[in-house]
């Protein structure tokens, strides 16, 4: 009889495997939204940084050209103030008029994670 017990193979039961899968699902539900928030925060930070850089280059252009604002972003590139016209993250659109550059969020991306598209001006 002792010999027979040694030959019995031990393994995981279906219940144990289901419990592990449920625990992993709960952990994934908690962790995944944090990564998407980080990507959205990085896009927003990138847009802010680019906007500040472009605004400072517009001001530099004004100082060096007797107060004249560049006509458009292409003029800043042509005059060597910036390397290329900025490419904004998804959901952002620029408005440039008379040396005043603003970014507006067009509502195509859900930044706050509430399941609906966010609209309105970013205030930058």
Image (cartoon, helix red, strand yellow):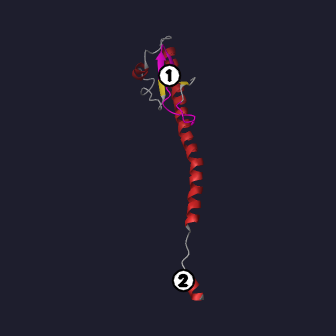
Tell me if mark 1 has few (under 14), some (14-19) or many (20+) residues whose alpha carbon lies within 10 angstroms of its own. Answer: some
In front of the other: label 2 or label 1? Answer: 2
Q: Which residue is mark 2?
A: 7
The reply to whether callout 2 and callout 1 are in contact (CB within 8 Å) is no
Quadrant of the drawing holding the N terminus? bottom right
Percent coordinates x, y for residue 60 in the rendering: 51, 19
Of residues 29 and 95, the one drawn nearer to the viewer in this rendering: 29
- The quarter of the displayed image where residue 4 is located: bottom right
- Secondary structure beneath dot 2 equals helix
Tell me if mark 2 has few (under 14), some (14-19) or many (20+) residues whose alpha carbon lies within 10 angstroms of its own. Answer: few
Percent coordinates x, y for residue 20 in the rendering: 58, 60
Q: Is residue 7 left or right of residue 72?
A: right
Query: Which range is magenta?
Result: 94-117
Instruction: Classify 44 as above or below 94.
Output: below
Instruction: Classify 28 as above or below 93.
Output: below
Q: Residue at x 54, y 41 (%)?
A: 36
Percent coordinates x, y for residue 41 in the rendering: 56, 36
- Secondary structure beneath dot 1 equals helix
Of residues 124 and 118, the one drawn nearer to the viewer in this rendering: 118
- Whether residue 122 appears in magenta in the rendering, the answer is no
Q: Which mark is residue 28?
A: none
Q: Residue at x 52, y 18 (%)?
A: 59
- Whether residue 109 appears in magenta in the rendering, the answer is yes
Q: Residue at x 51, y 23 (%)?
A: 103
Q: Which residue is mark 1?
A: 57
* Number of marks present in the image shown: 2
Alpha carbon separation for disc pair 2 and 1: 78 Å
Percent coordinates x, y for residue 68 in the rendering: 48, 11
Mark found first going from the N terminus, 2 or 1: 2
């Amino acid at each position: 009889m002792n010999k027979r017990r040694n030959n019995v193979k031990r393994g995981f039961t279906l219940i144990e495997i289901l419990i592990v899968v449920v625990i992993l699902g709960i952990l994934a539900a908690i962790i995944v939204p944090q990564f998407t928030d980080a990507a959205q925060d990085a896009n927003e930070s990138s847009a802010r940084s680019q906007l500040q850089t472009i605004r400072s280059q517009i001001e530099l252009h004004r100082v060096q050209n007797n107060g004249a604002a560049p006509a458009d972003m292409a003029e800043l590139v042509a005059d060597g103030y910036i390397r290329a016209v900025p490419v904004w993250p998804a959901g952002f659109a620029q408005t440039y008029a008379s040396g005043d550059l603003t970014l507006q969020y067009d509502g195509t991306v859900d930044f706050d994670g509430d399941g609906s598209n966010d609209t309105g001006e970013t205030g930058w």
